[in-house]
């Protein structure tokens, strides 16, 4: 029972740390409490990000840190594929039944590693294309869940029990007789690199808020234009008579 609880805590913790990193970044952009983001993402890894889904509009930019993390994720994917072929565990052949075991000897594990590596490459390409926040969250889920499950499985069954089911209940008796092989170390380094990258990646993704556009004046039609009113002119007074009347002529004409 204690081993199962330990395995669950390992998976939960491995998913909570990158989830908190994304929650802090999204909370800052949305103008919400960072402390609330930390609590929600710790209690509900990745699900807590839904509370900060409403983000302001703006220009998305990937800084140097973001590009570096995306590049290192591709490196981690290549290392994971290479790690399929060398032995992950080596030891006494009389105990293991062979000199060592690698993922190439277990088809399901090999397929899982290939899919994991392809997900890293696809996520890095999406970040370079501009769809970075959604791609970063997807990468975080994939890497943290895979890493947590691998560590939890080794914690439950031991490194030898991953490949030899008969040795899952014999961890105490085979200590010192089974060792991590070169493939296991390569896989461990690839997992650490990928995990560190998904934790740092959100801090390399920036959003420049969009400034509100100034209102534009609509041109008025000639019918809508208002001209200044003209005052009526007062009639001028004429010489020698009343206002507005011509003087009368007396006497004969020419």
Image: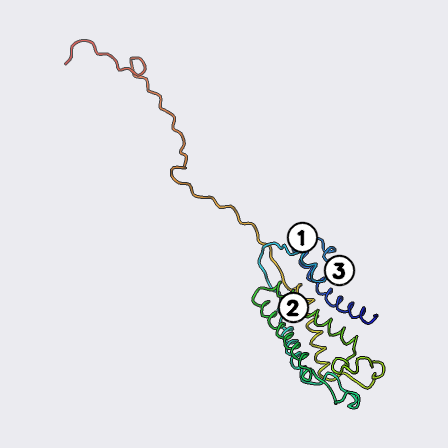
**Quarter holding residue 182:** bottom right
Q: CA distance from mark 2 to mark 1?
A: 25 Å
- Of labels 2 and 1, the one closer to you: 2
Residue 44, given in percent of the width and then of the height, sits at 73, 60
Tell me the tag on residue 43: 3
Relative to residue 94, is residue 86 drawn left or right? left
Q: Of marks 1 and 3, which one's residue comes earlier in the chain?
A: 1
Q: Residue at x 57, y 58 (%)?
A: 59
The residue most toward the bottom is 94
Q: Residues within 10 Å of mark 1 (few under 14, many from 20)?
A: few
- Mark 1: secondary structure: loop
Q: Of marks 2 and 1, which one's residue comes earlier in the chain?
A: 1
Relative to residue 45, is residue 226 drawn left or right? left
Q: Quadrant of the C terminus?
A: top left
Q: CA distance from mark 1 to mark 3?
A: 21 Å
Residue 57 or residue 115, whichever sits in front? 115
Residue 90, given in percent of the width and then of the height, sits at 76, 86
Residue 153, given in percent of the width and then of the height, sits at 76, 75
- Of labels 1 and 3, the one closer to you: 3
Residue 124 or residue 155, whichever sits in front? 155
The residue most toward the left is 254
- Mark 2: secondary structure: helix
Report if the CB atoms under discs 2 and 1 are less than 8 Å apart: no
Tell me the tag on residue 4: none
Q: Residue at x 80, y 88 (%)?
A: 95
Q: Which residue is labeled 1 in the image? A: 31
Residue 215 or residue 14, whichever sits in front? 14
């Amino acid at each position: 029972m204690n081993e199962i609880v330990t395995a669950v805590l390992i998976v939960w913790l491995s998913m909570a740390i990158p989830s908190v990193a994304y929650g802090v970044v999204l909370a800052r952009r949305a103008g919400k409490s960072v402390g609330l983001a930390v609590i929600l993402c710790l209690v509900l890894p990745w699900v807590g990000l839904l509370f900060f889904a409403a983000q302001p509009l703006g220009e998305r930019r990937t800084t140097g840190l973001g590009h570096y993390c995306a590049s290192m994720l591709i490196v981690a994917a290549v290392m994971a594929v290479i790690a399929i072929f060398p032995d992950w565990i080596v030891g006494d052949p009389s105990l293991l039944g062979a000199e060592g075991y690698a993922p190439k000897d277990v088809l399901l594990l090999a397929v899982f590693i290939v899919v994991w590596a392809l997900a890293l490459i696809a996520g890095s390409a999406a970040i370079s294309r501009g769809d970075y926040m959604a791609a970063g969250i997807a990468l975080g889920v994939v890497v943290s869940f895979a890493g947590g499950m691998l560590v939890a499985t080794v914690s439950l069954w031991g490194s030898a029990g991953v490949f030899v089911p008969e040795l899952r209940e014999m961890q105490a008796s085979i200590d010192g007789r089974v060792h991590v092989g070169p493939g296991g170390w390569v896989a461990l380094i690839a997992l650490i690199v990928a995990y560190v990258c998904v934790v740092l990646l959100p801090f390399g993704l920036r959003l420049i808020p969009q400034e509100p556009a100034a209102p534009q004046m609509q041109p008025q039609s000639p019918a809508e234009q208002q001209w200044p009113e003209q005052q009526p002119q007062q009639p001028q007074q004429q010489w020698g008579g009343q206002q507005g009347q011509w003087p009368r002529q007396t006497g004969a004409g020419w």
